[in-house]
Amino acid sequence: MLQAIGLTSTPRRDAPPAVNDLTFEAPPGRVTALLGAPRSGKTTALRLMLELDAGRGVAYFRGRPLHRIAHPAREVGVLLGDVPGHPSRTARGQLRMLCAATGVPVSRADEVLDVVGLAGLGDQRLGALSVGMDRRLGLAAALLGDPHTLILDQPAEGLSPRENSWLYGLLRAHAAQGGTVLCATDDPKEAARTADRVVTIGAGRLVADQDVTEFARTRLRARVAVRTPHAARLAAVVSREARAARRSVEVVEEAGGRLTVYGSDCAEIGDTAYRHGVPVHRLADEIGDTGPAAPPEPASLRRTESAVALSELPPPIRVRPARGPLRPLRYELRRSLGVRTTTMIMAAVLLVSAAVSLLLARTDGTALPRVLAAWPALLPLPPAALGAGLLGALSFGDEFRYPALAAARGTVPRRIGLLVAKLTVTAGFALLLAVLAVAGGAQSLRLVYGPELIEMPDNAVALAASWAALTVGCAWAGLLAAGVFRVAGAGIAAVLAVPVLVVPLVRKVFAVPSARTVTGFPERLRELVARQLPQEADHWILAVARMVAQPVGTALALSLSALVCAYLFTSLRGRARW
């Protein structure tokens, strides 16, 4: 049972709310249509139920609001608009990424692809899908978690009549198994043909809540039912005269010599048939969506007859997914590796780093660590650090540009598990990029200039730690800034701001004479801890202190601290769940 109680959207400025005190129910085992003209508040009502828009009221899914459900994807399947995925990602890769986020087996992706008729198109990229295939993929994503409730916004938009029949056969099969289906539509005939109950709204308010038989009898537009042995001739004559008179008349030919005429009346059709000598056996005004020969059929009878044509559903998931730290980590790995952007960025960074290292080695004035890091004095950051920052910025930037975790553009669940997973994966990519850049630079130098150029410095461990901290810090700065400002460009700007803006400020602070020193800091730190630190800890504490004391290290630490605080502050306002 889906219950919407008092849904009211937050109005913009002086405009009235798009949805105002909307209350209705969608019972299980039935297909409910949410009918309304364009801009009547249908989509806003669905977003309020899914807690994607701010407002008042509550929606209960089998007695619980969405934010109280431990596994939302197992309770509600959603299709709002197009499939929000990266255009370079494949259909199968998109579903497998969502499998990791939902906590269901990866094999579920192939099962739902087969059910929606995309089994042979799993390797098709999202950007190349047609409208019909995109809607099928969206329905596959909605069915991925084997939900009890399906919420769909204009699911048949852009589909052919044959695809329409298949779609509603699938929805009716879901309802026949005890599920709840709520579809928003603006076509009254479609609502009467496919739904068991029709909830009509206008200007954000409830207009009517009716059984489909009552709806077809009272709310569909009037028409003229005609039976004649010359149906095609009469249809052509009526259409020609309507065009000549510039009137909007729709003529629908049906089986058995029947015509359905919208936009006219019995007197006009009778006069036209008389003038052209067309015999008429029946002429009557009707209201409804059934044939003129029979009254509207009860919804229970239509469900029984359509049970033969019910579409196949994916098999149920027997085991409920367990929550754990690996679920967001698997999602982030599949999100990062599901497109070629990550590998292309890393390959470009390695090529640029090798080329810059070779150019720097031609001069004697550049130290070996800077040569291996490909960091000339002209660049604010080495290519590896910039590449790591770009990967971090895209980690959250792509979420807001192609949101796959929530059914709304720009909506990304702000959960600590997702943040930790993104920090972990971006740190791993940054470290891999740092190691490969140094190794590639060293190998290039050996190949071009010989092995005598490469000498292991005495402080190699400290240099390696500083190099790793720089790349990881840039990756995290890009990640957090993109998460706060919801765009990848902000993440890249935050990475560049560290050497361009923050480092000069830090150097000015360091240029001021200091009246205090940190001499004896390890000993004082040892006194504060409850247990004795090992003697080797002094060396590592001093090494970390020297690293942070560098202008770049201090600037990066300050930037990360500010971005973490900003991200946590913005997270307090989010209601979406991971």
Image (tube, rainbow, N blue to C red):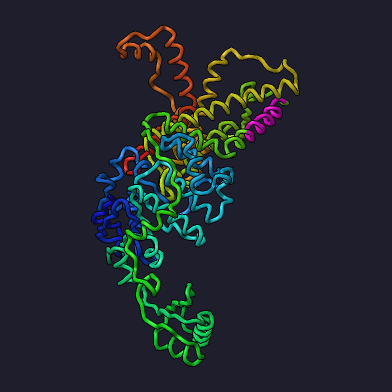
The secondary structure making up most of the magenta span is: helix
Check the picture and name the quadrant holding the C terminus: top left
User: Can you give x and y, in whole percent of width and height, for residue 61 in the image?
Assistant: 29, 47
* Residue 416 at least partly seen: no
Q: Which residue: 30% across, 51% down?
A: 28
Q: Nearer the viewer, residue 358 or 232?
A: 232
Tell me if residue 329 comes above or below residue 117 in the rendering.
Answer: above
Q: Nearer the viewer, residue 223 or 280?
A: 280
Q: How many numbered marks does the figure carry?
A: 0
* Residue 575 at least partly seen: yes
351 falls in the magenta region: yes
Tell me if residue 488 comes above or below residue 331 in the rendering.
Answer: below
User: Can you give x and y, in whole percent of width and height, for residue 499 in the image?
Assistant: 52, 34
Residue at the far bottom: name it.
275
Q: Place residue 574 in its image quadrant.
A: top left
Tell me if residue 392 comes above or below residue 80 in the rendering.
Answer: above
Q: Place residue 7 in its image quadrant.
A: bottom left
Q: Is residue 47 left or right of residue 271?
A: left
Q: Which residue: 47% across, 83% down?
A: 247
Q: Which residue: 35% across, 51% down?
A: 175
User: Can you give x and y, in whole percent of width and height, for residue 50 in the image?
Assistant: 34, 49
User: Can you give x and y, in whole percent of width and height, for residue 539 in the image?
Assistant: 46, 11
199 falls in the magenta region: no
Q: Is residue 340 left or right of residue 155?
A: right
Q: Nearer the viewer, residue 512 or 23?
A: 23
Q: Which stretch did the figure color magenta?
A: 347-361
Tell me if residue 539 comes above or below residue 64 in the rendering.
Answer: above
Residue at the far top: name it.
535
